[in-house]
Image (cartoon, grey):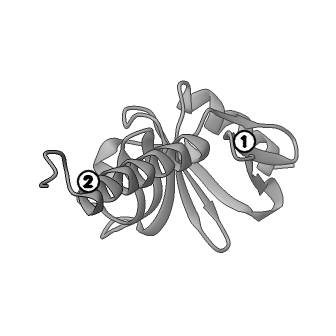
Amino acid sequence: MESLGWPTEVLWLKYLLFLVFLVSFLVVLGYMPIRLKADGEKIAVSRLFGALEIPLSEVTSVAPISKSYIDGSIRTFGSGGAGGYLGRFKNKTLGRYTMYATELKHLVLVRTRQKKYVFSCTQPEEFVAYVQARLKR
């Protein structure tokens, strides 16, 4: 007797693909930036899977940038739209950098001794002024 439904191998493949998609989506949501904040000691990006913290003692510069700074970027690892723009990128202007951005309109570039970070920020000028004031101390 012939089966009228899908072969068992195809059903398992369907469930496996769904599981891979679900896990990938949850990982992106977990690392998606929720809030960018700074205090007298660090810059922190809140995420579901823990905060990314950059001590101000490691920060060499901070500046608002336009989207043109990241134009032509190549994503080497991460997400490029679903849940934001997060991961590692590179381009001719910045070289290699790590980005945590939910949108590309208001961006801030943070340089440390070892890395470059691009963050989205609702008030980039105020954020930069606050961090620069703390760096001068």
- Nearer to the camera, 43 or 29: 29
- Nearer to the camera, 134 or 67: 67
- Type of amino acid at the residue the image marks with label 2: Asp
The residue to which callout 2 is attached is 71
- Helix, strand or loop at label 2? It is loop
- Type of amino acid at the residue the image marks with label 1: Val
Q: CA distance from mark 2 to mark 1?
A: 25 Å
Residue found farthest to the front: 1
Q: Position of residue 21 (x, y in %)?
A: 39, 49
Is 126 situated above or below 107?
Answer: above
Q: Position of residue 108 (x, y in %)?
A: 52, 43
Q: Residue at x 87, y 41 (%)?
A: 40
Looking at the image, residue 90 sits to the left or right of residue 135; the answer is: left
Residue 93 location, quadrant? bottom left
Q: Nearer the viewer, mark 2 or mark 1?
A: 2
Looking at the image, residue 79 sits to the left or right of residue 129; the answer is: left
- Any mark on residue 131, and which? 1
> Is residue 70 visible to the viewer in this orientation of the structure?
no
Q: Earlier in the sequence, mark 2 or mark 1?
A: 2
- Nearer to the camera, 85 or 5: 5
- Nearer to the camera, 25 or 68: 25
Where the N terminus falls, by quadrant?
A: bottom left
Looking at the image, residue 44 sits to the left or right of residue 14; the answer is: right
- Any mark on residue 7, and which? none
Q: Residue at x 56, y 31 (%)?
A: 125
> Is residue 26 visible to the viewer in this orientation of the structure?
yes
Count of marks placed on residues: 2
Q: Position of residue 41 (x, y in %)?
A: 87, 47
